[in-house]
Amino acid sequence: MMTTRQRRNSHYSKLLLPLGAIAVMAYFGYHSFNGDYGIWSRDRMRREAIGLEAELASLKAERLALQERAKLLRPESLDPDMIDERARRNLNVLKSDELVIDLAAARQAKAQ
């Protein structure tokens, strides 16, 4: 003769599925805000992108200014003033009636 064991229904077994579902929803809810691609991270990435776009615009403007200065040094379009400026800077040559203001030294003194 075989005996069978009867189990009593536990009150806790009824709570197992809802608690599991709540835990899964809490996990995904937390990561939807705080995860690598969550809402707050997306806002942070947007702010960072705006800053990087501003930096890109300033670098493009600086590049264009440098290209314009480089155009003046090309052999087909030499600018006498540019040649004079570069030669004086490289050779440290001044005329007797000229005054030189070193902007780099002034900026360093101001920063300190």
Image (cartoon, rainbow, N blue to C red):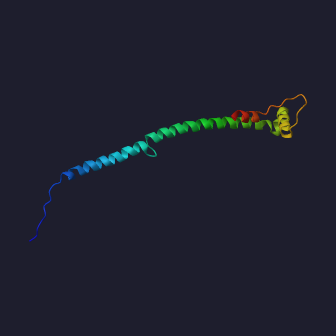
x and y percent of residue 9 in the render?
16, 54
At a point 91% along the width and 30% down the height, the residue shown is 96
The answer to which quarter of the image holds residue 78 is: top right
- Relative to 34, is 17 on the left or the right? left
Q: Residue furthest front?
A: 112
Q: Residue furthest top?
A: 97
Q: Residue furthest left?
A: 1
The answer to which quarter of the image holds residue 8 is: bottom left
x and y percent of residue 98 in the render?
87, 29
x and y percent of residue 68 in the render?
74, 35
Q: Residue furthest right?
A: 96
At a point 40% along the width and 45% down the height, the residue shown is 31
For the C terminus, the image quarter is top right
- Relative to 35, is 66 on the left or the right? right
Above/below status of 18 relative to 97: below
The answer to which quarter of the image holds residue 63 is: top right
